[in-house]
């Protein structure tokens, strides 16, 4: 997975002043063509990461491609700019009044799903982007990457979403906004999201900057007042859209307001230390760097830790958050851990670190509660696929289907197979060593995703394990 980093121009003095800010990670997800990269570009402009001189250069480079300069800020290669489609995950560091933000722009094409799965484990808040243009919305929903991205994000741990209904300035039929909100609301409730507590709906325009920030909204309101009498029909549509927006739960908030006021849930702080490894690299012959997210507990420098599933013991030499050394890190932090070089061969993405007195389960068989959401064949005993848990994965095989529940809530014991839309309790055997815990022991390591030949087949939880 290749990350593109925007150069951090923040001074050392500014970094010291912002250490008290809360750090959150957000990701733009959704169907290809919905406008994720343009939204990312607008966010960078509105937070001051891109100045007007640089923006004018992008406008000149984009030539006749009107308004494409916003996406060119994040889409760096010629291939991306010619096709108007992101080809790799981009990552940016920026700040608001109260937050230090890590922003991921995730491509919407189907073949980027494996990279998306590896990234999702870092994310606190998901920004699901859909287009308000009918043909573009229906390309991603109810069949498409809008659905798959949302399923993956929810299944692997993201619990809060902002649904960004983009291109609202191009909406022809205001009533279609109701259809979009209703359709997504029904689906999100179906997969277990609480619409009042876990979901915001926010109509925006990446092209004009509408609802990206309050400052941009004020500028637009002034322009609209100046041109008020130019197009009466357009104004009537705008009034209808504004009336519909009044009924959404994003009232009087911009995207940057929602992000800045977002309260990160501090979970599992009292649990034993566990950290998910996302990447590694060797900076010098004397030390290696691990990049990851602390899932639970806390740890300090000079402490002994164990690396699972290899069961290798080593000592933490240093801990860094945003390139600054810290005494300790805690649940929710994204950190760099510095270790001795001999530990390099025992670590890969998906490994879990814990304190030396603890352990993480490496099961051979799982008892899972799953929901079937796609098919590549008959989901029956003997079905083989890939099981994902956070950033780790293993080949697996369904060894038994214990029970099923269909959409009519009818239960059946020992069914021969499970159909799309049905839930069931199944036994699954793993062929590689990965770290998994039952839901009752540790929730983050209990969430699983089953995929086969590029299709997300099922999602669910691990109830029991056998070592």
Image (cartoon, helix red, strand yellow):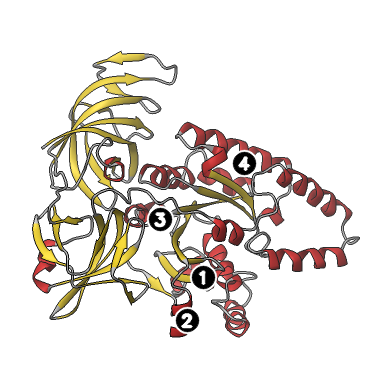
Q: Could you tell me which secondary element the residue under label 4 belongs to?
A: helix
Q: Position of residue 380 (x, y in %)?
A: 24, 26
Q: Secondary structure at mark 3?
A: loop
x, y (%) of residue 232?
Answer: 89, 54
Q: Residues within 10 Å of mark 4 (few under 14, many from 20)?
A: some
Find the distance from the CA under tag 2 to the CA under tag 3.
23 Å
Pointer 2 residue: 10
- Which mark is in front, 2 or 3? 2
Q: Which residue is mark 1?
A: 95
In the image shown, does 194 or 98 lie closer to the viewer? 98
N-terminal of the pair, mark 1 or mark 4, is: 1
C-beta proximity under 8 Å, tags 2 and 1: yes
Instruction: Judge whether 144 appears above or below 58 on screen.
Output: above
Tell me the number on the disc at residue 180: 4
- Which element is circle 1 on? strand
Q: Tag 4 or tag 3, which sits nearer the N-term?
A: 3
What mark, if any, has residue 149 been given in the picture? none
Name the residue at 55% across, 71% down. Answer: 44
Task: Identify the disc placed on residue 123.
Answer: 3
Give the secondary structure at mark 2. loop
State whether residue 429 appears in this view. Answer: yes
Task: Measure the alpha-carbon separation of dots 4 and 2.
Answer: 39 Å
């Amino acid at each position: 997975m290749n990350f593109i980093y925007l150069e951090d121009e923040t001074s050392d003095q500014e970094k010291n002043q912002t250490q008290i800010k809360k750090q959150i990670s957000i990701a733009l997800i959704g169907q290809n063509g919905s406008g994720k990269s343009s939204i990312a570009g607008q966010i960078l402009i509105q937070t001051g990461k891109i100045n007007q001189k640089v923006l004018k250069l992008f406008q000149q480079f984009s030539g006749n491609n009107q308004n494409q300069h916003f996406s060119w800020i994040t889409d760096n290669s010629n291939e991306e700019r010619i096709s108007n489609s992101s080809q790799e995950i981009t990552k940016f560091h920026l700040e608001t009044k109260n937050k230090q933000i890590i922003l991921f722009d995730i491509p919407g094409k189907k073949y980027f799903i494996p990279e998306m799965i590896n990234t999702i484990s870092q994310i606190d808040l998901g920004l699901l982007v859909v287009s308000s243009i009918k043909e573009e919305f229906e390309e991603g929903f109810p069949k498409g990457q809008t659905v798959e991205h949302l399923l993956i994000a929810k299944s692997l741990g993201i619990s809060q979403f902002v649904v960004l209904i983009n291109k609202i300035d191009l909406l022809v039929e205001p009533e279609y906004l109701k259809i979009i909100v209703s359709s997504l609301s029904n689906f999100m409730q179906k997969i277990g999201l609480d619409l009042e507590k876990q979901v915001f709906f926010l109509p925006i325009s990446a092209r004009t900057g509408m609802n990206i920030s309050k400052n941009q909204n004020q500028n637009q309101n002034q322009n609209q007042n100046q041109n008020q009498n130019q197009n009466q029909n357009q104004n009537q549509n705008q009034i209808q859209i504004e009336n519909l927006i009044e009924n959404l739960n994003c009232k009087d908030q911009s995207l940057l307001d929602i992000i800045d006021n977002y309260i990160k849930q501090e979970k599992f702080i009292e649990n034993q230390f566990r950290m998910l490894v996302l990447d590694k690299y060797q900076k010098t012959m004397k030390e290696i760097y691990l990049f990851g997210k602390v899932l639970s507990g806390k740890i300090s420098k000079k402490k002994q830790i164990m690396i699972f599933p290899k069961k290798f013991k080593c000592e933490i030499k240093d801990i860094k958050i945003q390139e600054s050394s810290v005494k300790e890190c805690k649940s929710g932090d994204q950190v760099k851990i510095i270790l001795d070089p001999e530990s390099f061969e025992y670590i890969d993405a998906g490994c879990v670190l814990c304190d030396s007195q603890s352990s993480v389960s490496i099961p051979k068989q799982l008892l899972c509660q799953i929901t079937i959401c796609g098919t590549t064949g008959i989901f029956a005993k003997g079905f083989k696929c890939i099981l994902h848990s956070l950033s780790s994965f293993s080949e697996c095989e369904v060894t038994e289907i214990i029970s099923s529940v269909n959409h009519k809530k009818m239960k059946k014991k020992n069914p021969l197979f499970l159909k799309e839309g049905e839930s069931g309790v199944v036994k699954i055997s793993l062929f590689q060593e990965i770290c998994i815990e039952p839901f009752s022991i540790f929730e983050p390591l209990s969430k699983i995703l089953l995929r086969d030949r590029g299709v997300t087949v099922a999602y669910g939880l691990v109830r029991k394990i056998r070592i």
